[in-house]
């Protein structure tokens, strides 16, 4: 617990991860976000700094967690010539937690090595509440020796974890996880939408699904929300579109045709185009139930 910790990206996931580690006795020394209000508010709560410059975040901590939205945001924090996390980063460890392309993780890993720093992937497959409670499931990639150095804090954040391999490999696995999850979600929405159009009781349909080959984790987490049109956001349609798109790009890179993922990606991209990207991924039912969005 002697390692000091900073966070870059303190939305709902990043902020709760920081709170969890603070509760476990780790020293959180700095938080940063492009939303200055979010950063300063969390800094006041945790009793730490909220630097305006990324280089000052790096200077303030031994281990820096990043939880950003996409590849462009990742490049902005690591590769901006005027201000970046890699300035003065020798000896620092970066733990990058967002679902991003494997390529950007590899770019960051190479750049970190050039300045004498280390980069790990810690891809998350859990929700906001899991982050707060230290019950994340983490897929990790990078240098295993560096992983062992930060394992005590990783253990406090996660109920389970799997070290996958070298740079980019955990990101590949996370893309597979979200690809399959999103396909399952789209399939469930179509099944429930057709059942509703045929006049079936949807509580009965969900019960039958749960006892047959139609059962899935998504049925448990999203089925009721699809029927009730309750799409409070835990994992947004916009993020689903991004993540399915990452898997789409990986498939094309190895010459595979994945028609189910292509169709699912198109559905989530349609949600974004219709202004529904801020809904939970369960909101894909709005595209399939008769009488909802076209």
Image (cartoon, rainbow, N blue to C red):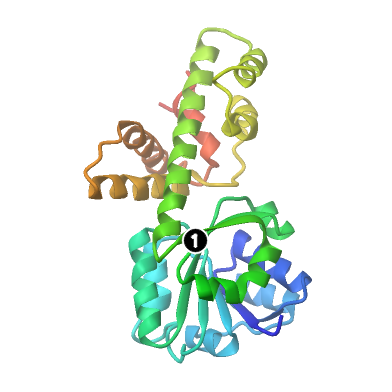
Q: Does residue 268 appear in this view?
A: yes
Viewer-closest of 136 and 239: 136
Residue displayed at 60% across by 74% down: 150
Most distant residue in the top direction: 199
Q: Which of 36 and 214 is in front in this view?
A: 214
Quadrant housing residue 267: top left
Q: Position of residue 114 (x, y in %)?
A: 35, 85
Q: Looking at the image, is 63 positioned above or below residue 224?
A: below
Question: Going 36% across and 47% down the picture, which residue do you hit?
Answer: 247
Q: Quadrant of the C terminus?
A: top left
Residue at image position (50%, 33%) is 185
Of residues 254 and 96, which is closer to you in this image? 254
Instruction: Name the foreground residue: 199 vs 61.
Output: 61
> How far from the left and from the top, in percent, is residue 21?
71, 70
Q: Residue 260's image quarter?
A: top left
Q: Residues within 10 Å of mark 1 (few under 14, many from 20)?
A: many
Work out which residue is located at the far front of the displayed protein and give it.
145
Q: Is residue 36 in view?
A: no
Residue 250 lies, in percent from the top left, at: 30, 49
Q: Mark 1 points at which residue?
A: 98
Q: Is residue 174 above or below residue 256?
A: below
Disc 1 is placed on an element classified as: loop
Q: Where residue 14 sits in the image (x, y, percent)?
A: 60, 65
Q: In which quarter of the image is the N terminus?
A: bottom right
**Residue visible at 46% across and 92% down in the picture:** 88
Callout count: 1
């Amino acid at each position: 617990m002697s390692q000091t910790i900073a966070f870059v990206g303190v939305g709902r996931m990043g902020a709760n991860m920081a709170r969890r580690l603070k509760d476990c006795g780790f020293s959180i020394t700095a938080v940063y976000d492009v939303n200055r209000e979010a950063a300063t508010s969390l800094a006041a709560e945790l009793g730490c700094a909220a630097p305006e410059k990324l280089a000052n975040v790096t200077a303030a901590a031994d281990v820096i967690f990043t939880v950003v939205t996409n590849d462009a945001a990742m490049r902005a924090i690591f590769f901006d010539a005027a201000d970046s996390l890699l300035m003065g980063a020798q000896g620092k460890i970066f733990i990058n937690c967002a679902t991003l392309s494997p390529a950007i993780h590899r770019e960051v890993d190479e750049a970190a090595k050039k300045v004498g720093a280390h980069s790990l992937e810690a891809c998350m497959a859990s929700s906001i509440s899991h982050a707060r409670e230290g019950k994340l499931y983490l897929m990790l990639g990078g240098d295993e020796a560096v992983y062992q150095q930060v394992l005590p804090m990783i253990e406090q954040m996660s109920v389970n974890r799997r070290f996958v391999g070298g740079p980019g490999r955990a990101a590949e696995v996370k893309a597979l996880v979200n690809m399959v999850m999103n396909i399952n979600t789209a399939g469930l929405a179509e099944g429930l939408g057709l059942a509703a159009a045929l006049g079936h009781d949807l509580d009965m349909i969900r019960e039958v699904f749960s006892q047959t080959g139609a059962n899935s984790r998504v049925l448990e987490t999203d089925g009721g929300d699809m029927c009730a049109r309750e799409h409070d956001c835990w994992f947004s349609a916009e993020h689903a579109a991004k993540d399915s798109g990452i898997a789409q790009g990986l498939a094309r890179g190895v010459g595979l045709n994945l028609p189910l993922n292509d169709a699912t990606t198109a559905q989530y991209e349609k949600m974004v185009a219709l202004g529904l990207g801020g809904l939970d991924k369960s909101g894909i039912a709005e595209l399939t139930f008769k009488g909802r969005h076209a």
